[in-house]
Amino acid sequence: MTVAVDPSRSVGLEAQAKPVVFSGIQPSGYITLGNYLGAIRNWVDDQPRFANIFSIVDLHAITVPQDPVELRGSIFTLAAVYLACGIDPQQSAIFVQSDVHEHPELAWILNSVTPVGWLNRMTQYKSKSAKQREQTSAGLFDYPVLMAADILLYHANYVPVGEDQKQHVELARDIADRFNGLFGETLTMPEPSIRQVGARIMSLSDPTSKMSKSEPEGAIGLLDPPDVIRRKIMRAQTDSFRDVVFDRSRAGLFNLLSIYRLLSNETESRIEERFAGRGYGDLKRELAEMVVDALEPIQSRYGELAAAPDHVVGILREGADRVRPTAAETLAQVKERVGLGVARIGWP
Ligand code: TYM
């Protein structure tokens, strides 16, 4: 009684099948330029080529303590940011993860085919749990399995993410492979899609670590006011050299130049020529203006959307309604394969 669904059709997109893209961001308050350059901007650029599903992964956010009122606000802010950045609800389904209960339900089943040893190897878990020790939630440990469920529910072909999520997408592949091996070909093998430039934007205050929402001083927020952006970039840590060249060993400078390159779309040699004979101060000043100019239209659209909450909520409701049939179908198929439940299938 298995029904094959064409996921691109059931996310309400065009009749002809397109490869399916799934990605998501946690609503944890502060949305960084790293999230934008490593993820959202690429989603927007590639939107026409794919059947797109973009989630606000609130069930992932609660794996670390959250204030309920702030969490609700962050979900709304992230939805408005998706739209302000150019995610188009005509081309992409946008929804809140916890509005589609199939996500945690599939995660539970996948938990049972995922060896603990695989989860023990997840580097993000190791670094996050090191700070919380015994207080670390079981959810944080299990987080990559929920992420696998997100991706596998929709038979996603591609998962556009920054470098830090690569290991999690590879785990989703391993889980799919193991499930298919145990129960027969059911889940589609996803592929991480990671750009060469921008996949790892570094902190402005410590360019050896990733720009992260947990360290706002080293991060640029998409909604930071222009003066804050200028101040953070002017204070960015560099080194004591002077010449402006793309040199990976000069991490702070390389990071600033990478951001410059992404926002200007110029080649490395063109940028080096532009700054020949000039110093880091000039680079920082020009970069700051470039970031302010790039974020200005996003911030102004965000302002409009924030003033129209019903419109944003309507898009999220509609997005959940569009993806639910595929999620339900995949879950039903998985349950049937595993031998779970009776109400839907009856007695054989
Ligand atoms: P999250 O919320 O930490 O980050 C969202 C996206 O932003 C990218 N990113 C960066 N890219 C470049 N440089 C940076 N400094 C930087 N910081 C963040 C991340 O790589 C990511 O693409 N587990 C995921 C959310 C998730 C998900 C999924 C993603 C849940 N389910 C299914 C894809 C598919 C996370 O915590 O991302």
Image (cartoon, rainbow, N blue to C red):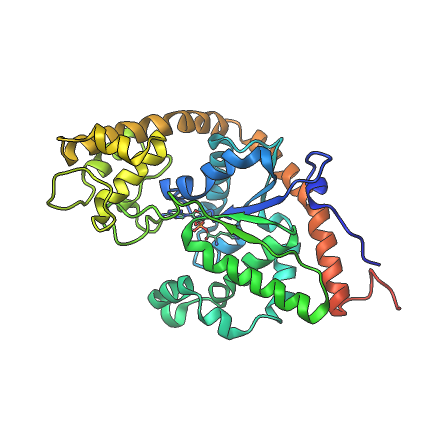
Q: Is residue 5 left or right of residue 43?
A: right
Query: Quarter of the image holding residue 283?
Result: top left
Between 276 and 330, the residue placed more toward the observer is: 276
> Across the whole image, how many numbered discs are drawn on residues?
0
Q: Report the residue that reaches farthest toward the right.
A: 348
Residue 162 image point, x, y percent: 43, 49
Q: Is residue 88 left or right of residue 105?
A: left
| Above/below status of 323 relative to 82 | below
Q: Report the residue that reaches farthest toward the front.
A: 269
Quadrant holding the C terminus: bottom right
Q: Is residue 280 left or right of residue 181?
A: left
| Above/below status of 257 relative to 57 | above
| Above/below status of 219 relative to 287 | below
At 59% across and 36% down in the image, what residue appears? 49
- Is residue 74 at all visible to an observer of this figure? yes
At 18% across and 37% down in the image, what residue appears? 244
Between 195 and 213, the residue placed more toward the observer is: 195
Quadrant holding the N terminus: bottom right
- Is residue 108 at all visible to an observer of this figure? no
Q: Is residue 143 left or right of residue 51?
A: left
Between 68 and 128, the residue placed more toward the observer is: 128
Residue 184 image point, x, y percent: 73, 66
Residue 117 image point, x, y percent: 49, 74
Between 128 and 179, the residue placed more toward the observer is: 179
Residue 63 image point, x, y percent: 47, 59
